[in-house]
Image (cartoon, rainbow, N blue to C red):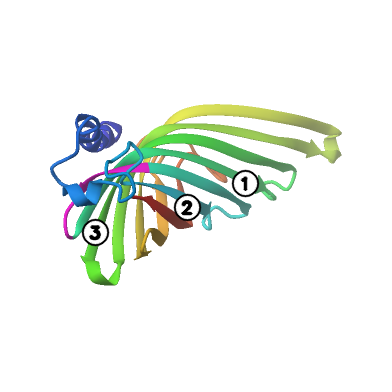
Amino acid sequence: MYKYLFFFILFIPFNAFCQGAGEQGESYSKEEVESPQTGKATFWSDSKVDFSIIFDPFNKPVHGGGLLVKWKKRWFKTKHFEGYTGLAVQYYYDEETDKLSTWVKGYNHDLSGYLVSEWIYYPFRACGVFLGIEPFAGITNLRSDGRLRFDRFNLYEEFTNTYTFFNYGVSQSVGYQLNNVHLSIFALASLKGYLDSGRTRPTDQDAKIFLGANVSLAIE
């Protein structure tokens, strides 16, 4: 049920984005859309690129970090709100230094591709402070590599497991806009495993909560 809700939330802005791809949306004035150098808009106008670092502070004793890159196109704008739709790629690596047993060591790395829909609210546009919420949905490929060792029983085994699954969640951010640069901190919750029957094994679960810092570069 929850995954269908996320598809519905993402469908609305993507539908608006596709309808407006061949013409300028009514939410913009001509001056806002046109490039000051060329006098006309391009496909890349009114978009932004995000570069984020993320880490999971709650999944101890696992240690790791990751990168998150997004490209988003603005399709809606008012005095206090902006709407974006785009794509995201996320890579995360963590090392299992100590699972429930000290005989198991290894690492996980996952690669994800998402559709994202971001909504930004500027309470006071003049001061540049903003709040953001961004639902996402996509595919995650998780790979686990490690070794199991029991010296007492003269047992040693290496293992590799891969798992691909539908992933979805939401990100919330607070930040500051400085001209064409947006600086923000955020919390990203992958809800797979919390709202459905995803895997919830210790240190190796589908549901994760990341904290991160982001720099966005706006393309006017």
Residue range (magenta): 72-79
Q: Quadrant of residue 148?
A: top right
- Determine the CA span between mark 2 and mark 1: 12 Å
Point out the frontmost of discs 2 and 3. 3
In x, y percent, where is residue 206? 47, 39
Taking 43 as reference, is 51 above or below it?
below
Q: Which mark is residue 94?
A: 1
Asked whether residue 77 is drawn in magenta, I would say: yes
- Circle 3 sits on which residue? 121
Secondary structure type for disc 3: strand
In x, y percent, where is residue 184? 41, 61
- Do residues under tags 2 and 3 come within 8 Å of each other at their CB atoms? no
Instruction: Identify residue type, mark 1.
Output: Asp
Q: Which mark is residue 115?
A: none
Q: Seen in the image, is 164 located left or right of residue 216?
A: right
Taking 124 as reference, is 48 above or below it?
above
Secondary structure type for disc 2: strand
Asked whether residue 44 is drawn in magenta, I would say: no
Q: Is residue 194 at all visible to an observer of this figure?
A: no
- Do residues under tags 3 and 1 come within 8 Å of each other at their CB atoms? no
Pick out the residue farthest to the front. 38
Residue at 81% x, 32% y is: 156
Instruction: Identify residue type, mark 3.
Output: Tyr
Q: Quadrant of residue 192?
A: top left
